[in-house]
Image: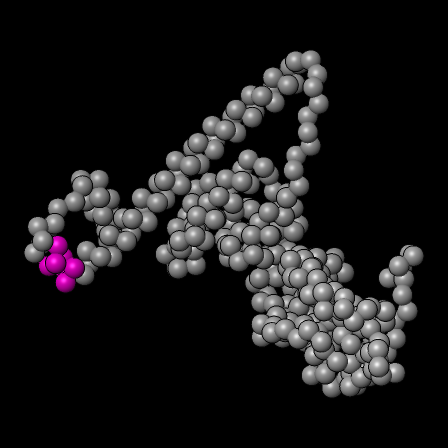
Amino acid sequence: MNGSEEKEIVLIPLDKITIVNPRDRGKKKYRQIVNSIANIGLKKPITVTPKPSLKGEYLLVCGQGRYEAFDELGESEIPAIVIDVPEEKLLLMSLVENLARRNPSCLEMVHKIGTLKEQGYTFAEIAKKTDLNVSYVRGIVKLIERGEERLVMAVERGQIPVSVAVTIAVADDHDIQRALTEAYESNDLRGKKLLAARRLIEKRQTDGKSLRGAPKRTNSAVSGKKLLQAYQAESNKQRLVVQKSKLCETRLLFVVSAIRQLIEDRRFLDLLRSEGLDTMPAYLVSELSNRKGLS
């Protein structure tokens, strides 16, 4: 810490700190905190305030996960910043601190991965230090190097698998559609996740890789450059229409794949015949025959 907001960091015994606003934490997230502190060390001190009635005793304002991780690792003291907080504001501050740290945590992890890679660590070493899968780290680094902020965010939010995100970053439209189909058939992308992936692809096509908005254009006289920009913008719209048509084609492929699995079930066929529903559109018959011939 530096600047005018710099505060003294002191070592405080763990048994002198009381958690006033305990909250449950996911086991995976907690394990990441423990492993990170064990491998890298504590990056940010906890925040405490003195107990009004007991000298040398403190109440925890922020840092429950770090406090519990130090306790599990067998440490007796923890670095802390001491601030003076009125008792009536302590609970509110603790809640605000916890909520404020939930959203940036994924981005902090991505930043940490990128920094470690720049420092020369291997993928295996980064995976060990961050308690993540090696293939996940490799994919995230590739996305970071290509400036794929939008895809990185989607991966961290659990919207798409990192393997699909890397394919989107490096492949053409045909390979993207194939990756979506394979993710659907392997049950990695279904329902809302599949729709979110399609919207993400469209958003990336129109708004680019970065999460930052494009700069606003200033009004000026019409020029050849502006005409070219208008033409390119219209071309982008046309490509988006083509992209949407390919997504529709992908949906039809999913339908064909599902129907093919159903008609291989003899009991299902018997049920259809008993209800007089043993015919289907010629397009489906043709597609099923073609796919069967290819398999």
Residue shown at 29% from the left, 48% from the top:
255
Residue shown at 61% from the left, 72% from the top:
25
Task: Pinpoint residue 258: horizontal percent, then vertical percent.
Answer: 28, 53
Task: Pinpoint residue 15: horizontal percent, then vertical percent.
Answer: 78, 86
Determine whether, in the image, residue 97 is placed left or right of residue 268.
right
Over which residues does the magenta segment extend?
266-272
Task: Work out whether residue 59 can be spotted.
Answer: yes
Task: Work out whether residue 163 can be spotted.
Answer: no
Q: Nearer the viewer, residue 96 or 200?
A: 96
Residue shown at 70% from the left, 16% from the top:
220
Determine whether, in the image, residue 60 is placed left or right of residue 124.
right
The image quadrant that residue 65 belongs to is bottom right
Task: Pinpoint residue 260: horizontal percent, then vertical percent.
Answer: 24, 53
Q: Nearer the viewer, residue 199 or 120?
A: 199
User: Above or below — where is 233 with respect to 170?
Assistant: above
Which quadrant would the N terminus be assigned to in this image? bottom right
Say how many tags the image has.
0
User: Above or below — where is 222 with respect to 213?
Assistant: above
Residue shown at 46% from the left, 45% from the top:
198
The image quadrant that residue 112 belongs to is bottom right
User: Above or below — where is 249 with respect to 83?
Assistant: above
Magenta stretch: helix, strand or loop mostly: helix
Task: Pinpoint residue 153: horizontal percent, then vertical percent.
Answer: 60, 52
Q: How is the image coloured?
A: one colour
Determine whether, in the image, residue 156 is placed left or right of residue 295.
right
Q: Nearer the viewer, residue 6 or 242?
A: 6
- Let me know if residue 132 is in the magenta part: no
